[in-house]
Amino acid sequence: MSASTTDLVIHKPPASATRAIPNQPDYAKACARFSWAVERLALLGLPGGGINIAVEAVDRHLSNFANVLGGLGIQPGERVFSLLGRVPELYLTALGTLKAGAVFCPMFSAFGAGATSRAAGNRRRAGSDGPTPN
């Protein structure tokens, strides 16, 4: 059943309600002195200089990581363990692993040394044929 344009109800707010009233007394002054260039320079002080989260950049990083896994001999369906904190690299690692067709297995230091070694078990390390050292 298709809807015709006469069946659609479109709500239009009154002209007086189309713009929200700023609730900060210095809103106009803050807008006047704000600069994206200055804010971008402030990111340079962050660890790693900030991160570019543009879709193209993320896709490039994911492809690079998936290619690295392939170069290390990781096949689709194999497990990739990662012991990272909540940093941008964790998310890139997870998504890059999935892009390579492998299974991402996050490990966190809160699991403890025994739990992480049991989770990894007798798995081979990427790029080697031997078992993971204990």
Image (tube, rainbow, N blue to C red):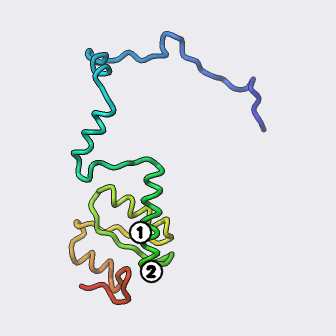
Q: Quadrant of the C terminus?
A: bottom left
Q: In front: 122, or 33?
A: 33
Which secondary structure, mark 2? loop
Task: State the image coordinates of residue 108 (x, y, percent, origin top left).
Answer: 27, 66
From the viewer's perspective, tell me whether residue 93 is left or right of residue 133: right
Residue at position x 36%, y 84% in the image = 123
Question: Is 33 positioned to the left or the right of 93 in the image?
Answer: left
Tell me which residue sits at (25%, 69%) in the image: 111
Residue found 75% across the figure and 23% down from its top? 6
Instruction: Give residue 82's quadrant in the image.
Output: bottom left
| Nearest the eye: 119 or 37 | 37
Q: Secondary structure at mark 1?
A: strand
Query: Seen from this angle, which residue lies furthest top?
Result: 16
Q: Which-is-in-front pick, marks 2 and 1?
A: 2
Mark 2: amino acid = Gly
| Residue topped by disc 1 | 104
Q: Residue at x 32, y 34 (%)?
A: 37
Check disc 2 and report the residue beneath it: 73
Residue 105 in the image: state x and y as whole percent. Answer: 38, 70
Residue type, numbered disc 1? Phe
* Closer-to-camera residue (102/61): 61
Of marks 2 and 1, which one's residue comes earlier in the chain? 2
Question: Left or right: 71 with respect to 31?
Answer: right
